[in-house]
Amino acid sequence: MIEEPTHFAANRLVAVLTAEPLNRFLDYKAPEGGVFMGAFVEVPLGPRKVIGVVWGAGEGKFDASKIRTIRSVLDVTPMRLEMRDFLERVGRYTLTPMNAMLRLATRAPGLANPPSMQRVFALGEGAPDRITDARQRVIDTLTANDGMRFTSKELSDIAGVTPSVIKGLAKQGVVIELETPRDVAYPNLNPDLPPKDLTDDQKTAAAALCAFVATQTYQTTLLKGVTGSGKTEVYLEAVAECLKQGRQALVLIPEIALTVEFIDRIEKRFGHKPAEWHSGVTMTERRRCWRMVGAGKAQVVVGARSALFLPYQNLGLVVVDEEHDTSYKQEEGVFYSARDMAVLRASGCKASVILASATPSLETWVNGKTGKYNRVDLSRRFGAAVMPDMDTIDLREQEMGSNSWISPALAGEVTQGLERGEQSLLFLNRRGYAPITVCRACGEQIGCDFCDARMVEHRFHGHLMCHQCGDTKPMPTQCPSCNEEGKLAAVGPGVERLADEAKERFPDARISVLSSDMSMSARALKQRITEIASGATDIIVGTQLVAKGHNFPLLTCVGVIDADLGLQGGDLRAAERTFQLMRQVAGRAGRAKKKGRAYLQTHQPDHPVIKAIVGGDEEGFWRAEAIARKQAGVPPFGRMAGIIFTGSDAQAVFNVAQMMAQNADALRALGIEIYGPAPAPIARVRGKHRVRMLMKAAKDVPLQGALARWRDQARIPNNVRVSIDIDPQSF
Ligand code: ADP
Ligand code: ZN
């Protein structure tokens, strides 16, 4: 797409898109000096000023004398045609009004404000009265990063000194303090630094990816490689190729907790840190990132799904790491899959997409089979590491003590590991101490006041917590229902309770709990992981967090406490999810020289999914899953949408759902099947009642158009909200 920079002269009518919930464009006159298409502008709206983007020529439908003039043109790069196009396409696909789409694309704090200033330090001319180790480190840091300027905090962090050392040096003029705008360019990343010595397999894979990137055309490639095969090393070479082409690269990662580790890897490969975009980044830094990406002065962005909506000037590559991860799906506000939208984004700007995973989503696997996506495989682990042996432990045959979840067989394996000085991981995908708190006198289970969900006991934090809405309350001493004292009991295991059992069973072992709610900072988490990796722990007790991307070279034994957990419920994706999670967890074992073993505790060792996990015939598993999905006519062979009705008044919510189901003949006529309405799996969240409908259609049915007409014709009262979720996660 070649962009003709359309310019509107002063007083010409232009259509401006704002983020206001108006559902239409607003006409304004171009200001003195005119305005470019795509420009970010500030316009008067009633008594307020709001930010918008010039989206096209005005329609002149309104009384010209009443039309107001754009107040100011903001000092940021205008939005490119490809970006406007992308927002329109995502809007059409997800049935999202354009004003809500614009909100996604303007999530930069202080867009209209002039750049704020900050105090930074640079090397001065003065000589120190005396030199200490700490002072020398400050001087070395500034010399080594020639021309770079650091805030007091950055400098003290990097040099490992207290701020007073810097102050001391500043007094003597050894370092000088300057005022600069905060929005400074990110340092140039250097693709020519030497990469690690790649193995022959890795070289072949990297060369294939680089060749795709070098074509500068749209391509999507599935990079499939077992955990530890070096996928990251390999796709970083594709990033290097993209940098050599002078284009920008985006790497999406699924878990913010992993960014610190990941940023360090990029810094080692390319000499500097990339830009970062996720909810853990400060406002000032986010503002800098947004502006510098738009100015072409940030070459690599590492981020969460919303980083797709940054204003890239020349995007050449999007990597979606762990592409199967469910966190790529946003399920509030705009419902979108960052993986799918990455493909859409890249196709609009002649960029490559790399979808990396050891256990790809079925959608991506099918696209790799049909040739819609390229496929590059890394079938061997790096170095001497091999995939672990896997086996089941049949819980029906094990003597399980009461309130015990580690079977004798598994305990035996852990003990052997301890004797050999090797690490074990006990995996349970349940946060907290116990999922249920029940009164032994009256049977009452403590629930959330706002959701149809149980409160989960968190002993580490000393309270009860709802995993739906995050509400907490102190652990009561008496039953809230029958008021009996001391009758409340924990039922079932969470990861904290499992850790208690492990401590009892293995009193001499050093045990670490790794769970996403231990309220650790990203740095502290990285520190903990580094310590574990270097052998400071014998037994790791962990949730999902450990399944994602960490390397624990000393880990040889993995025990999955409840392999059946994800298989309950009627969800058609349950098999896929369980398969992915179990293979990922098992893949944590034996990543260095010693072979690993993984054990799945299960009540149903003959379940086809459990057998597929243990048998390791991955291609066979996906083939069977694909056949099952095809027969059911569900994604990726058919299309689905979830319709979610929410509101505080349960009856009103159900009435609207009922009314809309009755007025859906036009949908049925197109061959769309309608299931429900029925209460959603969790029927009340944050005090809002939820009713759900599912729609299923063949691939060639124009689902979005039909749904949009159906929704727009319905008379929906203000107290009920209707959201449409195209490609829902569960069905
Ligand atoms: P994956 O992303 O497939 O799980 P990684 O890229 O994280 O694999 O690699 C696993 C570990 O092996 C990492 O610590 C990585 O640095 C190391 N590694 C992989 N390939 C090489 C190589 N060619 N040389 C040195 N170390 C490597
Ligand atoms: Zn709740």
Image (tube, rainbow, N blue to C red):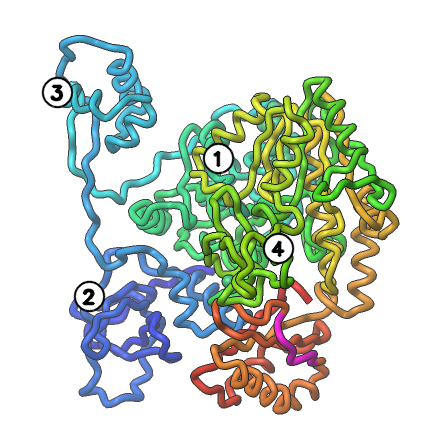
Q: Are marks 3 and 2 in contact (CB under 8 Å)?
A: no
Q: Are marks 1 and 3 in contact (CB under 8 Å)?
A: no
Give the number of the mark in front: 2 or 1: 1
Q: Quadrant of the C terminus?
A: bottom right
First in sequence, mark 4 or 3: give its number.
3
**Residue closer to the observer: 94 or 219:** 94
Position of 163 compared to 315: left or right?
left
Give the residue number, with chain letter if any, for mark 1: 525
First in sequence, mark 2 or 1: give its number.
2
First in sequence, mark 4 or 1: give its number.
4
Identify the magenta region.
Answer: 674-680
Question: How many residues crowd mark 3 within 10 Å: few (<14), some (14–19), many (20+)?
Answer: some
First in sequence, mark 1 or 3: give its number.
3
Is 379 part of what is drawn in magenta? no
Residue drawn at point x = 62 percent, y = 46 percent: 494
Which labelled disc corresponds to residue 173? Answer: 3
Cα separation between marks 1 and 3? 38 Å
Under circle 3, the secondary element is loop
Type of amino acid at the residue the image marks with label 2: Ser
Residue drawn at point x = 66 percent, y = 33 percent: 502
Question: How many residues crowd mark 2 within 10 Å: few (<14), some (14–19), many (20+)?
Answer: some
Give the x, y percent position of residue 553.
64, 25
